[in-house]
Amino acid sequence: MTKTRILLADDHALVRMGLASLINYQKDMEVVGEADNGESAVEQTLALKPDLVIMDISMPKLDGASATVRILDELPATKVFILTSFGTSADLLKAVISGATGAFLKDSPNDELLDAVRRVAAGETVIHKAIQMQLGEAQSLLSLTPRQLEILQIASNGFSTEDIARQLNMSQDGIKKHFASICTKLGAANRTEAIAICLRRQLLKG
């Protein structure tokens, strides 16, 4: 049987120890590496190329959402499973928008957690109901792509469509189409309102 290779990223050693014990007891999965901060999580993932990363949101040096972005930029086929005891809607949104396909709570029963990990490893998206409720009205933001967030971030710094196109090596028409799609997704009248919505939800750096 081919085992799912998993990397654990959490700044609490006891959490990693408990997860490693649980996972290594399973016949279909194994822990191949551990990281105690976000930067190490990125480095270990790039070096070990696991199938799946179980990622905490709140970590030193680099938060889980930002680590997810970096990992999936380099290794888009890697699955990222957010496992957190808490986390703001903004943090969770960033992680999910950036490509994490799992988000669960640390106090979930072991059998539910393992089932969710297996489903994410198989290609499903699994978000715990409590986290879905926490995201609440921010659900519409989940449809934004990493590229659209990047465009909004640049635009929020005062750059024009021409400037954004030049920075991203895209056509101005392409940027305009992205803005039209963003406004439709967010129900915004224009780019200014779209930027304001994302700033309010802490998805952009002000």
Image: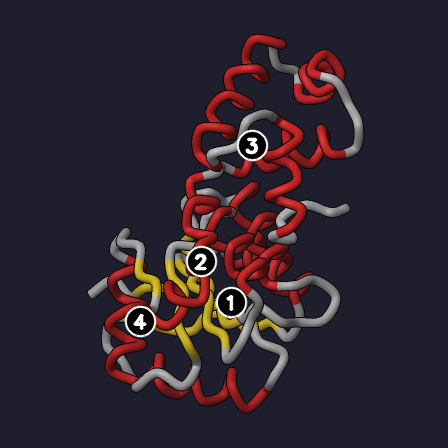
Q: In whole angstroms, how far apart are the C-alphas of marks 2 and 3?
A: 19 Å
Residue at 66% from the left image edge and 30% from the top image edge: 192
Labels 1 and 2 touching (C-beta < 8 A): yes
Q: Nearer the viewer, residue 147 or 187?
A: 187
> Which residue is located at x 20 percent, y 65 percent?
1
Residue sitting at the far left: 1
Q: Residue at x 70, y 20 (%)?
A: 164
What amino acid type should be assigned to the residue bearing mark 2? Val
Disc 1 versus disc 4: nearer the observer: 1
**Label whose residue precedes the other's in the sequence (1 or 2):** 1
Of the two numbered discs 2 and 4 in the rendering, the one whose residue sits closer to the viewer: 2
Please give the residue where the numbered disc 1 appears in the rendered image.
Answer: 55
Q: Is residue 199 left or right of residue 80?
A: right
Q: Is residue 191 above or below residue 19?
A: above
10 Å crowding of disc 2: few (<14), some (14-19), many (20+): many
118 and 167: which is toward the camera: 167
For label 4, count other residues whose C-alpha is less than 10 Å away and answer few (under 14), some (14-19) or many (20+).
Answer: many
Location of mark 3 (residue): 147
Q: Nearer the viewer, mark 2 or mark 3?
A: 3
Whichever of labels 1 and 3 marks the residue nearer the N terminus, that label is 1
